[in-house]
Image: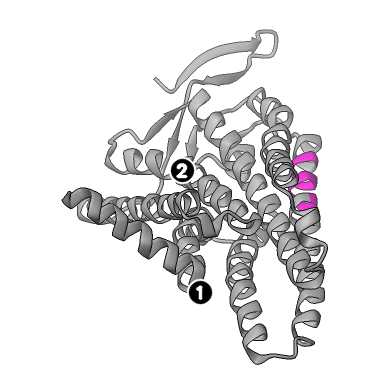
Amino acid sequence: MPFSFIDLRPMNRSATYVVTEFVLLGFPGCWEIQIFLFSFFLAIYILTLLGNGAIICAVRWDPRLHTPMYFLLGNFAFLEIWYVSSTVPNMLTNILSKTKAISFSGCFLQFYFFFSLGTAECLFLAIMAYDRYLAICHPLHYPTIMTGKFCGMLVSLCWLIGFLTYPIPIFFISQLPFCASNVIDHFLCDMDPLMALSCAPAPIIQFVLYTQNSLVLFLTMSYILRSYTLLLRAVFQVPSAAGRKKAFSTCGSHLAVVSLFYGTVMVMYVSPTYGIPSLMQKILTLVYSVMTPLFNPLIYSLRNKDMKLALRNFLFSMRIRHNS
C-alpha cells in the first residue's frame, strides 16, 4: 500500500499520511504508445552510452588527445553517462510497470543524483569555457596554467561541489508531511512536483533550493558568456582565415551544447513553472536530461577533426581486434 494512516493530533482529529512510495505518471497513453515510448527511449539511452563511451575510449587511447581540452571532454562524457542513467533506466521500468511506483527512498535518491549531476554539468561547462578562453586568448601561458594536476583539481571540484550542494535541502524536503496523494505527474522525482504534494508550506526550503539553482545557473552561465565574449573578440583578431575557422569549429560545438542545456534548464528552474502545462515541463526536462547527453557526442565529434580522426582510428582498431 502506498499510504499508512496515522493520527498526529488525536485532540482535533486532524490527520496525515506516511508516504512509502510515489506514483510517477510519466507519459500516459495506450499500451501501443507505451511500447513505442519504451523502444524510443531505450534506443536513445543505448546511443547515448555508446556515443559518450566512444569519446571516453578515444580520449583514453589516442595519444594526440592527451591534452587538457580532451581530458575535460572525456570526463564530461563520463558525467553525461551517469546523468542520463539517473533518469532513463527508471523511466523505462516505469513505462512497462502497471503500478508505476517508485519507493520513497528511491524517489529522493533520484532527486539527489539528478540535481547533483546537473550541477556538476554546469560547472564542467564553465571550466571547459575557461579552458578554451586560455587556449585562444593566452596561448603562451596555457601550457603552464592548464597542467594535468590543475585539470584534475578542477574536475574533482566539479564533482565535489555538485554532490555536496544538495544533501541538506533534499533531506529537509524528505521530512515534509505528504497528504492525500502520492501521484507525481512527471517521469522523474523533481523539485516542484514533490513540493506540490506536501501539505505543509516550506517557503524557506523552497527559497534555499531556488537560490541554489539560480546561483549555479547564473554564475556559470555568466562566466561562460564572459569567456566566449573575450574569446570571440580574440578570434576576430586572428590574421589567418584557417586559424579563425579552427577556433570557431572548436568553440562552436561547446556553444551549441551550452545553448541547448541552459536554454531549457533556465525555463524549468529559474522562471516559475506553475503556468507551464505538465506535458511541456516533461518535454523540457527530456531535452536537457536525455537529449543533451545524446547530442553531445554528435556535436563534439562531427565538428572536431581531431575527435573524428581519433574515433575513426579507435573503431578501426576495434574492428581489427574483433577480426583477428
Relative horizontal placement of residue 202, taking residue 75 as reference (left or right): right
Residue at horizontal 67%, vertical 31%? 170
Q: Identity of the amino acid at label 2?
A: Thr
How many marks the image carries: the answer is 2
Q: Is residue 296 visible?
A: yes
* Residue 311, horizontal then vertical, whole percent: 40, 61
The answer to if 197 sits in the magenta stretch is no
Give the position of the N terminus as an image quadrant.
top left
Among the 4 quarters of the image, the one containing residue 294: bottom left
Residue at 64% over, 71% down: 255
Residue at 80% over, 42% down:
207
Q: Residue under circle 2?
A: 87
Secondary structure at numbered mark 2: loop
State which region is magenta.
Answer: 208-215
Quick check: can you spot residue 281? no
Quadrant hosting residue 48: bottom left
Above or below, comparing residue 84 to residue 103 in the picture: below
Q: Amino acid at mark 1?
A: Arg
Looking at the rendering, which quadrant does residue 117 occupy?
Answer: top right
Q: Main secondary structure of the magenta part?
A: helix
Task: Check the image and report above or below for 314 versus 132.
Answer: above
Disc 1 target residue = 303
Which secondary structure, mark 1?
A: loop
Q: Residue at x 62, y 47 (%)?
A: 118
